[in-house]
Amino acid sequence: MNKLELISALKTEANISKAEAAKVVQIFFANMADAMARGERVEIRGLCSFFVKDYKSYEFFSIFQSASGEKPYRFQGGSFCPGPMGY
């Protein structure tokens, strides 16, 4: 299911206009993204959870360039963790 299909399903189920359904979906994902940007974990009980992983810098050695150095800290995108589906 993609975003457009989600909007259509919400429009049908809630009996609201397509514009209102699109606004609800936009608000939902914007709040999810804001929470993850603050480092919070987003959990939809019984379905899944989303969280952001941070990786520390580390030293490396390149056998191809015969050089070593430190790979800097980098931001890793959100991770998806499926929940139990036996309900």
Image: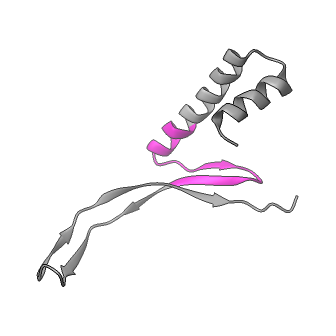
**Closer-to-camera residue (6/30):** 6
Compared across the picture, whether 81 is left or right of 61 comes to right
Q: Residue at the location (81% across, 60% down)? A: 85
Please state the horizontal and vertical placement of residue 81, each as a whole percent of the image.
Answer: 63, 60
Which quadrant of the figure contains the N terminus?
top right
Compared across the picture, whether 37 is left or right of 17 comes to left
**Closer-to-camera residue (54/23):** 23
Reply above or below: 15 against 86: above
Which quadrant of the figure contains the C terminus?
bottom right
Please state the horizontal and vertical placement of residue 21, each as a whole percent of the image.
Answer: 71, 22
Q: Residue at the location (65% across, 29% down)? A: 25
- Count of picture labels: 0
Reply above or below: 61 against 2: below
Residue 16 drawn in magenta: no
> Splitting the image into 4 quarters, where does residue 62 fall?
bottom left
Q: Residue at the location (77% across, 54% down)? A: 46
Q: How is the image coloured?
A: one colour
Please state the horizontal and vertical placement of residue 38, each as a whole percent of the image.
Answer: 45, 43
Q: Residue at the location (83% across, 25% down)? A: 12
> Splitting the image into 4 quarters, where does residue 75 fall?
bottom left
Span of residues in magenta = 32-51
Residue 41 drawn in magenta: yes
Q: Residue furthest right?
A: 87
